[in-house]
Image (tube, rainbow, N blue to C red):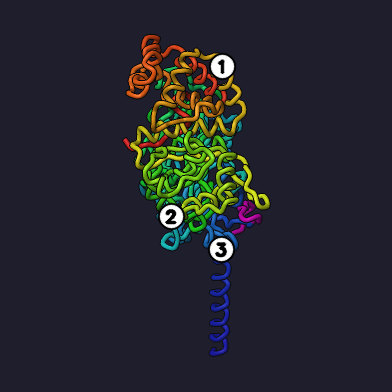
């Protein structure tokens, strides 16, 4: 009896062990479906019978596919915070409801079909995506859904669950680079959600009207800077009213304006323009012209690499006016590169004093009539005015630093830093014992100027940068200058020479045509007549020395200059999407 009892215990123990192994294997049923990451594929575990394949077959009842990540995928997501991305196909043209969510360890072991929804969310993660109709405009009914994984270690993603009330096939599953937003620019729509989840828009019109959440801890706290990409349709009317020519949205406590262009163009915003947390984006004007909004990591340089960098931030010129100083990489200035005109460097200085230290001596060497080609001493510089904003072509910069090097002129520390920046960015080039011109130009503004002047200066100095670097503009301006009313040109020359703070060398034809262009373009076309006939012509020095020219401009209401400005306005819009008074395609400001 004792032997029989002993054998009975052994049999029961073996059955118990077999049961554990069997049930463990049963819980980890390998699916036919695989997930891709880091150049490799791994099978997922099926958490219910339907999940052995990658298809939901149903007519109206909500059915579920649920998968657990296997070892390699689990290890990968433990080290990488990349989103889960699914390419799915809705196999019906009828209305369908789908949901996607991330599974937590607490969800495993439950009857998947009986997991209760809490606030339309599976499990314990506040990440759900819903749709109440098939995606219009996609003939194949294919769409990509991407969902950011919840933050570790408090939330440990171990799988995902997707449900549908109509037939659905998952064509691929993978971990992808961090992105949020939506796009209808390709045949198949694309939607990427932060860990907060959201709603899949059924149509482009619905996407355009949604208050879509772009925010994610990855973009707000990771070591890389992020960007926002917009794709706009080309149906905005550039010659219409203000309401017709721009798209507006609110984002991170700022109003963002995207301007019309003649052709389809993409627009990119560096998120360092914002100080508030990136979250919901809401379009308030012409939302129907927006085809995509994507938030991603565009600049792979780390924040640490960017600190005190002498390499420029490449952005649209319209973002400089309100770029927050707390996001500068240096305390004295920030350095930008104009995205529309690479190699045009834009300095924004903390104040006029710092700007003078960098550029005042250069101004007298290059442009001031009484000192061209000579080096003004520090003592002399203390008592003279430079400029509140600056512009210099590569040739002038090379001439200044080459001459200073040749005669061992003692430059100040900020001029030495300027030389280093220009050499590093190949605006000037050290060639043997000489410094020669590279490609590009330099323009500058100061934080000390009020916003309205900063805006005017960026337009004025910016167009100088275009003139320096673009032969097409120079050719057009030369032709326009020669056919503009001669008395209007004489008026401008008189103003340039009689105004003490300007004192331009009017014998320099290149300089005259460059300034002619910039003064016509620095204000919008509607303000051009008033600017010349009611403001410039009534200033003291021009009236004292050339009253007849001032009177001519007032009597003709500056017609010759207005006509020239009108031609310029059309030219710069056709070429670059600019208008008089606006040399940018994006702006961002706080209401």
CB-based contact (under 8 Å), mark 3 and mark 1: no
Do the residues under discs 2 and 3 have CB atoms within 8 angstroms?
no
Q: Could you tell me residue 537's position as x and y percent?
A: 36, 19
Disc 2 versus disc 3: nearer the observer? 2
- Position of 178 relative to 140 (above/below): below
Q: Which residue is mark 1?
A: 482
* Residue at (35, 32) in percent of width and height: 452
Residue that badge 3 annotates: 75
In terms of sequence position, does the residue under pointer 1 or pointer 2 come before the other? Answer: 2
Sequence-wise, the earlier of marks 3 and 1 is 3
Could you tell me what secondary structure mostly forms the magenta stretch?
strand
- Stretch of the chain drawn in magenta: 27-41
Would residue 164 be visible to someone looking at this image? no
Q: Distance between the Cα atoms at labels 2 and 3?
A: 22 Å
For label 2, count other residues whose C-alpha is less than 10 Å away and answer few (under 14), some (14-19) or many (20+): few
Q: Name the quarter where the N terminus is drawn.
A: bottom right
> Residue tagged by mark 2?
221
């Amino acid at each position: 009896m004792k032997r029989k009892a002993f054998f009975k215990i052994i049999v029961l123990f073996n059955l118990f062990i077999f049961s554990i192994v069997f049930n463990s294997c049963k819980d980890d049923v390998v699916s036919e479906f695989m997930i891709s990451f880091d150049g490799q594929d791994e099978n997922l575990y099926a958490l219910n019978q339907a999940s052995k394949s990658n298809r939901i077959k149903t007519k109206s009842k909500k059915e579920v596919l649920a998968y657990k990540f296997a070892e390699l995928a689990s290890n990968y997501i433990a080290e990488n915070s990349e989103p889960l991305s699914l390419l799915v196909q809705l196999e019906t043209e009828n209305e369908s409801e789908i949901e996607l969510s991330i599974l937590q360890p607490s969800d495993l072991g439950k009857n998947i079909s009986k997991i209760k929804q809490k606030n339309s969310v599976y499990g314990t993660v506040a990440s759900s995506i819903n749709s109440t109709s098939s995606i219009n405009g996609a003939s194949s009914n294919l769409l990509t859904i991407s969902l950011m994984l919840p933050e570790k270690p408090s939330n440990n993603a171990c799988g995902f669950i997707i449900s549908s009330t109509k037939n659905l096939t998952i064509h691929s599953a993978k971990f992808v680079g961090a992105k949020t937003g939506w796009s209808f620019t390709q045949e198949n729509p694309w939607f990427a959600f932060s860990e907060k989840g959201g709603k899949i828009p059924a149509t482009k019109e619905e996407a355009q009207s949604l208050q879509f959440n772009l925010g994610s801890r990855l973009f707000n706290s990771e070591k890389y800077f992020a960007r926002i990409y917009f794709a706009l349709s080309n149906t905005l009317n550039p010659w219409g009213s203000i309401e017709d020519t721009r798209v507006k949205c609110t984002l991170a406590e700022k109003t963002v304006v995207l301007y019309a262009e003649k052709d389809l163009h993409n627009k990119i915003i560096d998120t360092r323009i914002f100080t508030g947390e990136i979250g919901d984006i809401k379009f308030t004007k012409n939302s129907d012209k927006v085809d995509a909004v994507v938030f991603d990591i565009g600049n792979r340089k780390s924040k640490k690499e960017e600190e005190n960098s002498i390499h420029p931030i490449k952005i649209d010129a319209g973002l400089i006016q309100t770029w927050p100083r707390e996001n500068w990489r240096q305390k004295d200035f920030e350095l930008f590169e104009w995205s529309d005109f690479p190699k045009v460097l834009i300095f924004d200085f903390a104040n006029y004093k710092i700007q003078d230290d960098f550029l005042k001596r250069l101004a007298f060497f290059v442009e001031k009539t009484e000192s061209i080609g000579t080096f003004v001493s520090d003592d002399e510089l203390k008592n003279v005015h430079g400029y509140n904003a600056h512009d210099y072509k590569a040739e002038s910069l090379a001439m200044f630093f080459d001459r200073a090097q040749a005669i061992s002129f003692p430059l100040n520390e900020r001029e030495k830093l300027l030389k280093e920046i220009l050499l590093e960015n190949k605006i000037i080039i050290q060639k043997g014992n000489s410094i020669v011109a590279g490609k590009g130009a330099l323009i500058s503004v100061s934080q000390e100027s009020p916003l309205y002047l900063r805006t005017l200066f960026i337009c004025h100095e910016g167009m100088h940068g275009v003139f320096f670097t673009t032969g097409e503009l120079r050719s057009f301006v030369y032709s326009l200058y020669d056919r503009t009313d001669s008395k209007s040109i004489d008026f401008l020359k008189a103003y340039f020479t009689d105004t003490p703070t300007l004192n331009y060398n009017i014998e320099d034809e290149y300089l005259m045509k460059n300034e002619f262009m910039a003064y016509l373009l620095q204000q919008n076309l509607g303000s051009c007549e008033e600017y010349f006939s009611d403001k410039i012509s009534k200033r003291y020095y021009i009236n004292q020395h050339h009253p007849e020219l001032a009177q001519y401009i007032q009597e003709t209401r500056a017609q010759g200059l207005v006509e020239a400005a009108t031609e310029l306005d059309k030219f710069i819009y056709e070429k670059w999407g600019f208008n008089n008074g606006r040399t940018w395609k994006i702006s961002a400001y706080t209401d």
